[in-house]
Image (tube, grey):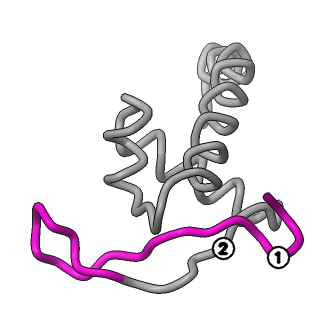
Amino acid sequence: MIEATSVEAYIGTAPQREVQKEAVYRTVCLALHPSSSDIARFTGLPRTSVCGRLRELEQEGRIHKASSKVDPFTRKRVNWYAPGRGEA
């Protein structure tokens, strides 16, 4: 069962999540082939928050996974993001 305080806390953070989402969206629009780790570095947001905001932006159609690249730090293949079609 979800506690009422948990629901209240989630609702209370809505403004903060919107600010984070706009920061992530601006970074996707301005950076060259940004991955979630790149966006976390550029914005200073925790990567877990970035991933949540990326998912929301994808669901809204504002961004999409454009392709993949090798991360220069981890040497692993990661997705990078671009504005949704008709955005930016």
- Closer-to-camera residue (69/60): 69
Q: Nearer the viewer, residue 43 or 1?
A: 43
- In the figure, 40 relative to 70: above or below? above
The residue closer to the viewer here, 45 or 27, is 27
Q: Which residues are magenta?
A: 69-88
Q: Position of residue 71 (x, y in %)?
A: 21, 70
Left or right: where does residue 24 sit relative to residue 41?
A: right
Pointer 2 local density, CA inside 10 Å: few below 14, some 14–19, many at least 20 = many
Q: Is residue 13 left or right of residue 78?
A: right
Q: Amino acid at mark 2?
A: His
Q: Amino acid at mark 1?
A: Arg
Residue at 73% x, 24% y is 14
- In percent of width and height, residue 25 lies at 66, 47
Residue 71 drawn above or below residue 5: below
Would you name the residue on which mark 1 appears?
85
Residue neighbourhood size for the residue with mark 1, other residues' Cα within 10 Å, grouped as few (<14), some (14–19), many (≥20): few
Q: How many marks?
A: 2
Whole-percent x and y of residue 66? 57, 81
Instruction: Give the residue displayed 10% in from the left and 66% down from the top.
Output: 74
* Quarter of the image where the C terminus is located: bottom right
**Separation of marks 2 and 1 at Cα, in angstroms:** 8 Å
Q: Which residue in the structure is indicated by mark 2? A: 64
* Residue at 37% in and 29% down: 44
The question of residue 73 being in magenta is answered with yes
- N-terminal of the pair, mark 2 or mark 1, is 2
Q: Residue at x 57, y 77 (%)?
A: 65
Q: Secondary structure at mark 1?
A: loop
- Which element carries disc 2, helix, strand or loop? strand
- The nearer-to-camera label among 2 and 1 is 1
Q: Is residue 42 magenta?
A: no
Where does the image place residue 67, in percent across and percent down from the top left? Answer: 48, 86
Contact (Cβ within 8 Å) of mark 2 with mark 1: yes
